[in-house]
Amino acid sequence: MFHIKFKPRLYQERIFHTCTLKNTLIVLPTGLGKTNIFVMCAVHRLNLYPNSKIVLLGPTKPLVDQYFNVFINNTDIPKELISIFTGKVNPEKRKELWKSANVILSTPQGFENDILSKRISLENVSLIGFDEAHKAVGDYSYVWIAKEYNKQAKYPRIIGMTASPGSDIERIKEVCKNLFIEAIEIRTEYDSDVKPYIKEKKIQWLYIDLPENFAKVRELLQKSYLWKLQQVSDLNLIPKEKIKELNKKELLELQASIRKNIDEGNKNHDLFKALSLLAECMKVQHAIELLETQDIFALKNYIDNLYNEALRSNVKSSKNLFEDPYFKSAYYLIDLMYQNEEKHPKLIKLKEIVKNIISENRNVKIIVFTQYRDSVKRIVNELNSIENVKAVLFVGQSKKYGIGLSQKEQKEIIEKFSSGEYNVLVSTSVGEEGLDIPSVDYVIFYEPVPSAIRQIQRRGRTGRQEFGNVIILITRDTRDEIYRWSAFHKEKRMYRVLENLKKNIHQILEENEKKNVITLNKFIEPKLKVVADFREKNSVILRKLSEMNVDIELKNLEIGDYVLSEDVCIEVKTITDFVNSLIDGRIFNQAINLKNYYTNPFIIIYGQEDMFSIRNVNPNALRGLIISLINDYKIPLIFAKNAIDAANYIYLLIKQEQEIKKKNIILHKKKPKSIKEIQEYIISAIPGIGYTLAKPLLKEFKTIKNIANAKIEELAMLPLIGEEKSKMIYRIFNEEYKED
């Protein structure tokens, strides 16, 4: 029997009781112990099913590391029975750990791959938790994992946890459907059983005026924007009276509508012109947002990047911007302001706030949130000019603008921030969820965010154990104000929607029963197999193949994305990737490798976009590529409408190779090193031979020379070679080479 090592709060007991009976979505403010409720459920299920396993999934490695500490500190489950699964752990090691562990803490992508490749089975998992459950929509790994779990598990129980599932009722319903939710347990800061544990938060909204020069730049950019929209209106694509009313969402919808029109074959020049103008509009709008909400330095970097793009590329929207008199005038004024080091008043106000806080108590901890990496870097530099301020940037892993932190670096920064080595953390959205920093005194929003989820998560970083302060900087009469009220109304709507769903959960259950019709195939032995490249990013294809009962093995493939047999290898591309592979030239190397190492390679291209309008590529270059692949390289091209359609093609090809032709999967490598490997490679390259027959041939005839000198009847005596293949081998080694 396992036990918890803490006394649960009343609301945790009540929520736990629901979780023991039904699949439950827990909506609880940050810092109120959602993970502890899961721990209570984990201990309960392990005691109920002693030989079962518990799985808790979280979107990032730092979060998974935190779960480990929660289990160690709050239960008597031995450390050796708790395992962490992340991309850093070798797949074979994960397979071994799975056998011995009772509690598995994992990121979802690697866990999904383990299920797909049959390294693990969910049959004996008695509880699975999805932290940050609002992510369980679309193609996110949570969705497929929950479906597979519900299909495989002997005694399933699901718990979803989030501080903020969003304000869109359809999105919340989708989360509930995807996670097979049967009950919703929601608590706000105002509920009677939660209120005693809520630490007071003081929220301040500080309004700032836009300076004169900033307003002048905005006016010029606004004129540029409206002039471009007027040109779109002149093409009869926007009513004149709506020009000033259009928002970003409507602009994106108009762009999508025009692209669809073009994809359907309408090549009217006006449509291409409108697309370019709308692209310019979006760039100008982004410039206005940076000006209003960030700093002149962030705006200058953005405009400079556009200028370099206009000089060095064929992107018409960027080139046209610098021919626009309003935009050019704004650019000159921005450059002048940059030279004069004019700062956004937000930056000045932020420095003043931080200076005052630190001067009163240098041991406080402050998190500053901002949208943009450029701003993070700038803010850190400015704050570090203040006495006793030790600020550090905290961003995601991808290297944008030369800035990026690995998960190891992120963890080290959090530890140093927690220990007091840093007292100000300046973070992008990566710090909004999952940070285990229990004593943050101040959270400062450099700008409001229009998302209820993100506003709640930012706010939740403070007031977890002690009194908390939230300060939100707003530039008056800008989109800052729009975003403030947008998030406010979305948050109110979210709680109304959740309360309504809580009362009417039976309706969701009825919808789930209709939509989640599952074919039980867990006891069917897979007959078909495929080896897929583990870097193959389109998990939709892998999931679909798995649903069709294909046994998937993930490997690092040197050639192609899917190997179906000794003869068939498939390279899969989206239409966009196909076009890009022509531009960067890699398609030719890929085609050569496919043809050199496999007798019958295929290229599958999927998507419904018009490939001739994706990039500024001569249409005849694309047509020439298609003809060359089919005619010169002899590689068939299959065009599929989407990833699922592509998966269906792959499935039929697997059936043909493995059920009809009875061929085995053999991986051909690009770089044979030993003499033996080179010999096998040379003989396997003979059409119809492959690695399966290369070895028996070499074993029988000892050397390549003997195979070359063999007579047709000698070759035909070997099992599986036959007369036709014997004639082919003989011709290859004896027929005179003729130049084309």
Image (cartoon, rainbow, N blue to C red):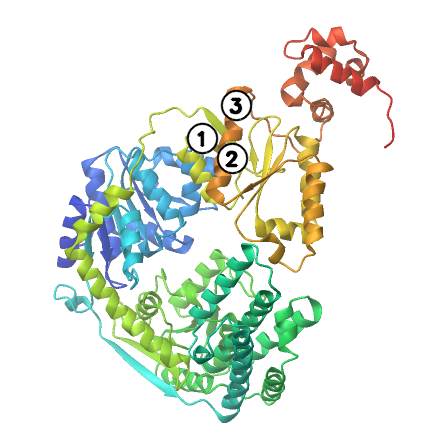
Q: Are marks 2 and 3 in contact (CB under 8 Å)?
A: no
Question: Which residue is tagged 2?
Answer: 649
Q: Nearer the viewer, mark 2 or mark 1?
A: 2
Residue matched to label 3: 658
Q: Position of residue 304 (x, y in %)?
A: 63, 76
Q: Which residue, given by chain and number where applicable, does mark 1 sit on?
A: 550
Q: Horizontal placement of 266 versus 4: left or right? A: right
Where residue 529 appears, as percent x and y from the top left, is 49, 28
568 relative position to 429: left or right: right
- Which type of secondary structure does the marked residue at label 3 adopt? helix
- Taking the view exactly as shown, the residue that stands out farthest to the bottom is 212
Mark 2 surroundings: few (<14), some (14-19) or many (≥20) residues within 10 A: some
Going 36% across and 73% down the picture, which residue do you hit?
Answer: 365
Q: Position of residue 447 (x, y in %)?
A: 40, 77
Task: Say if residue 75 shows up in the picture.
Answer: no
- Write the residue at 69% across / 40% down: 629
| N-term mark: 1 or 3 | 1
- Looking at the rendered structure, the kind of residue marked 1 is Val
Q: Is residue 297 above or below residue 123?
A: below
The CA distance from mark 2 to mark 3 is: 14 Å
Which is more N-terminal, label 3 or label 2?
Answer: 2
